[in-house]
Image: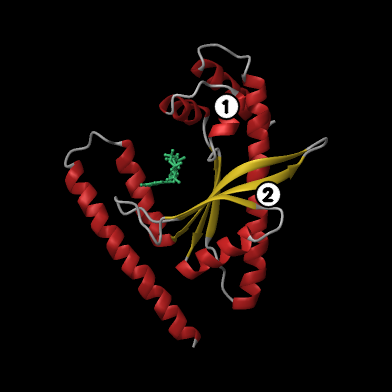
Amino acid sequence: MEVENKNKNMESRLSNLLGGVIDEAEPFMHLMMQYRCAMLEVTTKLEVLNNELSMQNNSNPFESIKCRLKTPESIVEKMQRRGIEFSVKNVEENLTDIAGVRVICSFISDIYRLADCLASQDDIIVVARKDYIKQPKENGYRSLHLILDVPIFLTNEKKHMKVEVQFRTIAMDFWASLDHKVEYKKKIQDSEEIANELRECAKIISEVDTRMENIKNRIRE
Ligand code: 0O2
């Protein structure tokens, strides 16, 4: 019942966004359902790895996992920004981050371990890998991003879907959530100063992540 209501709500938001053109609304909802399934597949794979690795090492490789489907508003905005006409086919062919999974780890080594384990599974194809930990963005953003191609098995078909997985430490996530708030409030005062301050915090956080990793290794030894 709850899913039904959510779907109705998403369908009417989409038709409002598209100026009442509802031809695409039903196939769009179908596509969203498929992305939701792909997100579940990836989340389950990560939970399985977490269970196994935590038995081996006596600690969890990730602290938490969150997933989200991009909202119709955000999908339409991104298509417009890229100058691509809205159609279900174009959305599927051009956007790779409709299904998003965020994995929050304590240590950087856990990020690479989990990402490598996931990427090496034989039903997964890594379409793209962006390592913003080794090469942080100019503003200080750090995370490891994988775009995965994952099969989902429906009643009458097997379909390949794209899922974006972002791996971060707790500290990187703390930074990114504040940075995200700043991004959404572009008109705030002293934005230059805040951007510099955030860049400085990103540097400190990076050092803390490395030091925490070293302490963990010394404890293990
Ligand atoms: P949301 O709300 O998380 O969905 P593009 O997606 O076109 O902007 P690209 O190169 O395809 O750019 O994607 P990239 O660089 O891999 O980044 C995609 C996502 O990573 C973003 O999604 C954010 O979630 C996150 N991200 C990237 N850069 C930053 C940053 O500087 N700060 C923060 N806080 N997050 C970042 P969305 O769609 O922008 O947002």
Q: Residue at x 83, y 35 (%)?
A: 156
C-alpha gap between disc 2 and disc 1: 24 Å
> Which residue occupies the extreme top position in the image?
20
Q: Which quarter shows the N terminus?
A: top right
Mark 2 or mark 1, earlier in chain: 2
| Residue under label 2 | 41
Q: In this view, does 84 lie above or below 156?
A: above
Circle 1 SS class: helix
Residue 2 at least partly seen = no
Residue drawn at x 20%, y 42% as measured from the top left: 191
Is residue 142 found left or right of 34 in the rendered image?
A: left
Q: How many labels does the image show?
A: 2
Instruction: Give the amino acid at mark 1.
Output: Asn
Closer to the camera, 19 or 55? 19
Residue at label 1? 90
Would you say 83 lies left or right of 22 here? left
Q: In the visual, does 62 lie left or right of 138?
A: right
- Of 100 and 171, nearer the camera is 100
Q: How is the image coloured?
A: secondary structure
Task: Give left or right: position of 23 versus 199.
Answer: right
How far across and how far down the image is residue 105, in percent?
A: 49, 63
Q: Counting other residues with Cα less than 10 Å from the Cα at mark 1, is it few (<14), some (14-19), or many (20 or more)?
A: few
Closer to the observer: label 2 or label 1?
Answer: 1
Q: Given contact means CB atoms under 8 Å apart, are the residues at marks 2 and 1 in contact?
A: no
On the image, the x and y values in percent for residue 61 come to 55, 67
Could you tell me residue 42's position as x and y percent? 64, 51
> Residue 153 location, x and y as percent?
77, 42
Q: Is disc 2 placed on a helix, strand or loop?
A: helix
Instruction: Tell me if I can see residue 200 in this picture.
Output: yes
Image position of 210 with respect to 153: above or below = below
